[in-house]
Structure formats: structure tokens, C-alpha cells
Amino acid sequence: MKLKGRNKVSPEFSMSSMTDIVFLLLVFFMLTANSPNALDLLLPKAKGKSTNTQNVAVSINRNLDYYIDSQKVNPEFLEIELKRKLKGVDKPTIILRAEESVPIEKAVNVMDIAKQNDFKVILAVRPN
């Protein structure tokens, strides 16, 4: 007597669930990855357009610490470091990222350095 089993296990492997997991991991890491130049600053609100032309970012946080890109800089050597970073750059541009609570004199100081050295300054703001 020959008995056939009704429940056969399929030896095939489905990749669809694995693909879903890999896609979700990719999206997660893309959303949580930080830009290497980004500092956590609360920028002032304003209406305007952003630009992608950037040579150097100068950031000032609420503790009045100065950063060029992500490197902390002593305010006394800010002009020297900016000249060094922008040396030989055509149309040198500075993105000024000053936190909301930073006194305006600190931002004006950076703008003055840029004016003296013919650097273009763009003030970074968060969208309104």
C-alpha cells in the first residue's frame, strides 16, 4: 500500500522578506546618518532660498564656541583659519550658522572678517 503525504514542504527560498528588511535598514540608516559638517544649532527663522554653493561653514553655538566646518576654532584665530581654508578658492563663500541666542555682535564680527577679505557671506536660517 502506497501512501502519499498531503503536506509537502517546498524547498524553495523566497527573497522578498529579506529584500524588505534590507530596504527598511537602508532607509533607517539614511535618515539617521548625520552629515559630517553638521552641528546641532537652532537657527533663526526666515523666508528665503538656500544655496548649494559652499566653501566653508562657520558656526557659532549658544556657548559662543566657533567652528569652521566641524572643527572647533579659537575666535582669535578665526580670520587666520578662514584665510587658510579659502586660499586659492575662486569666489570664496562662507555659510554663517549662528544660533538664535548668539549676540548679533558675534555674527557681525564674522561678517566683518569676510568683508575685509572679500569673502561672500550667506546667513543660514531655518525655513519659516
Image (spheres, helix red, strand yellow):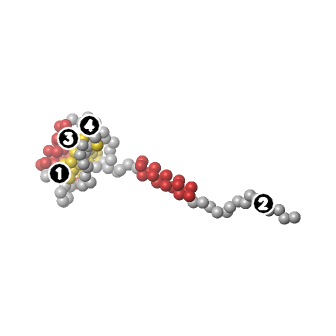
- The image position of residue 122, as x and y in percent, is 21, 48
Q: Which is nearer the N-term, disc 2 or disc 4?
A: 2
Answer whether labels 1 and 4 touch (C-beta < 8 Å).
no
Classify residue 5 as left or right of residue 25.
right
Up the image or down, 4 lies above or below 39; here it is: below
Answer whether labels 2 and 3 touch (C-beta < 8 Å).
no
Q: How far is mark 3 from mark 1, CA to CA?
A: 14 Å
Q: Amino acid at mark 2?
A: Gly
Residue beneath disc 1 = 120
- Looking at the rendered structure, the secondary structure element under dot 4 is loop
- Residue occupying the point 53% across, 57% down: 19
Q: Toward which corner of the image does residue 102 lie, by quadrant?
A: top left
Q: Toward which corner of the image does residue 89 lie, by quadrant?
A: bottom left
- The image position of residue 107, as x and y in percent, is 20, 41
Disc 2 packing (10 Å; few <14; some 14–19; many ≥20): few
Up the image or down, 14 lies above or below 105; here it is: below
Indicate which disc residue 5 carries.
Answer: 2
Residue beneath disc 3 = 107
- Residue occupying the point 76% across, 59% down: 6
Q: Amino acid at mark 1?
A: Lys
Q: Amino acid at mark 3?
A: Ala
Q: Which is nearer the N-term, disc 1 or disc 4?
A: 4
Q: Of circles 2 and 4, which is in front?
A: 2
Q: How far is mark 2 from mark 4, CA to CA?
A: 73 Å
Residue beneath disc 4 = 100
Q: Is residue 84 visible?
A: no
Q: Which is nearer the N-term, disc 2 or disc 1?
A: 2
